[in-house]
Image: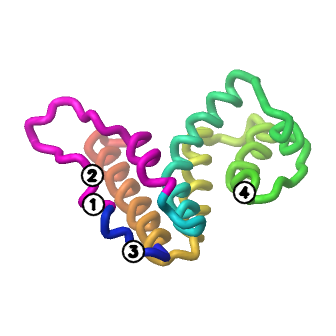
């Protein structure tokens, strides 16, 4: 990150093991953090929140309630990455142009595109974190598949 945010950890609420319900949500964290970040650091934080956008995109596509620019993506038009992340553009185009022979889960394809996009981040720590997270998730899936003999 381009700035040092020393106050960040000190300002977080105290959590204990006995807490059965967290009163501080991810949305609360973002709302508190975001206003004080530089524009460069906001882009880094946005990478972590795109995961939630993935689920929203899938809901939009399933409900057929598409926004105007999604219709243009369907036709193969391109939208600037600053307006709409390029991996979502790729996914939406693939979603509407998939054939019956394409045998994949949309959630898996979207996650793969998301990780590929995030690992291209210019911040080495953030891109390394996404690579590590992808590796850990793949290991967990492999272990689960082995456990159930899949």
SS for callout 1:
helix
* Mark 4 or 3, closer to the camera: 3
Residue 106 vertical position relative to residue 66 in the rendered view, above or below: below
Q: Are marks 1 and 3 in contact (CB under 8 Å)?
A: no
Distance between the alpha carbons at the discs numbered 2 and 1: 5 Å
90 or 36: nearer the viewer:
36
- Residue position for label 1: 9
- Residue position for label 4: 86
47 or 88: nearer the viewer:
47
26 or 68: nearer the viewer:
26
- Residue position for label 2: 12
* Mark 2 or 4, closer to the camera: 2
Q: Which mark is residue 31?
A: none
Distance between the alpha carbons at the discs numbered 4 and 1: 32 Å
SS for callout 2:
loop
Dot 2 or dot 3: first in sequence order is 3
Residue 85 vertical position relative to residue 131 in the rendered view, above or below: above
């Amino acid at each position: 990150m381009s700035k040092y945010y020393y106050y960040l950890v000190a300002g977080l609420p105290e959590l204990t093991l006995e807490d059965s319900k967290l009163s501080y949500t991810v949305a609360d964290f973002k709302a508190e953090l975001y206003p004080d970040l530089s524009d460069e650091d906001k882009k880094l934080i946005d990478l972590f929140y795109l995961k939630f956008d993935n689920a929203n995109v899938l809901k939009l596509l399933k409900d057929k309630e598409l926004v105007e620019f999604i219709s243009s993506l369907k036709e193969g038009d391109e939208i600037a990455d600053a307006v709409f992340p390029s991996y979502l553009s790729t996914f939406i185009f693939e979603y509407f142009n998939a054939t019956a022979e394409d045998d994949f889960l949309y959630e898996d394809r979207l996650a793969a595109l998301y990780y590929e996009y995030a690992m291209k981040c210019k911040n080495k720590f953030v891109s390394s974190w996404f690579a590590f997270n992808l590796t850990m998730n793949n290991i967990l899936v492999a272990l689960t598949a082995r456990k159930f003999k899949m």
